[in-house]
Image (cartoon, rainbow, N blue to C red):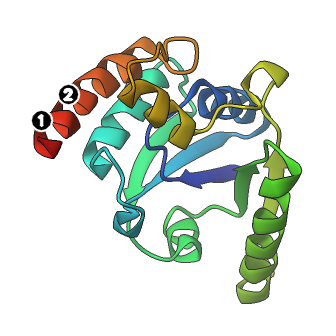
Amino acid sequence: MLRCIYPGTFDPLTKGHDDLIRRASKLFDEVVVGIADSKRKGPWFTADERVAMASEVTKDLPNVRVERFSCLLLDFVHQQNASIIMRGLRAVSDFEYEFQMAGMNRGMDPNIEVVFLTPSEKFLFISSTIVREVAYFGGDVSRFVHPIVAAALKVKVEERKREAN
């Protein structure tokens, strides 16, 4: 069984992420979306909220499951009995960082393969950071995220603005 891990913060999950998950679900027997706690990044959404959103968005994919993790990625890969890490690349700037990470992971465990996928052209410019910024300033993010995520973003923006005052 080919099981791949698609790790990330997914703060929030975008249509670009969803595109990659759906495409990976056709390539692998099972895709585990690994939601990293990533407290050091200061995510807007808790890990549990991100797991819930990703689970809802991907619920129609029988070979996809969403799991939270707060350990070294390779430890999570081993816990899930996976042998492949899948990463998304949007631009050349993503490649340099991802190439370094792939080399580090391969150096720590040569049995783990890293596979890169690029999202569909219409999603190449979308990032969680940009989506959060647009949402915060009242822009329409409905083209960039699933309706469930858009609704959660609206609530989160209101909370953050209340906290700022």
Pointer 2: what residue?
A: 158
Pointer 1: what residue?
A: 162
So how many labels did they put on this image? 2
Q: Position of residue 75 (x, y in %)?
A: 52, 76
Q: Residue at x 46, y 35 (%)?
A: 133
Kindly report the distance in space between the C-alpha atoms of the residues bearing marks 1 and 2.
Answer: 6 Å
Front residue (pair 61, 92): 92
Callout 1 secondary element:
helix
Q: Position of residue 158 (x, y in %)?
A: 20, 27
State whether residue 150 is above or below residue 37. Answer: above
Tag 1–tag 2 contact (CB < 8 Å): yes
Q: Position of residue 151 (x, y in %)?
A: 31, 17
Q: Residue furthest right?
A: 92
Q: Residue at x 26, y 46 (%)?
A: 48
Is residue 138 visible from the viewing direction of this image?
yes
State whether residue 156 is above or below residue 35. Answer: above
Callout 2 secondary element:
helix
Quarter assignment of residue 95: bottom right
Q: Residue at x 72, y 25 (%)?
A: 123
Is residue 1 visible from the viewing direction of this image?
no
Q: Position of residue 19 (x, y in %)?
A: 68, 26
Q: Amino acid at mark 2?
A: Glu
Quarter assignment of residue 155: top left
> Where, quadrant-wise, is the C terminus in this rendering?
top left
Front residue (pair 26, 136): 136
State whether residue 37 is above or below residue 53. Answer: below
Q: Residues within 10 Å of mark 1 (few under 14, many from 20)?
A: few
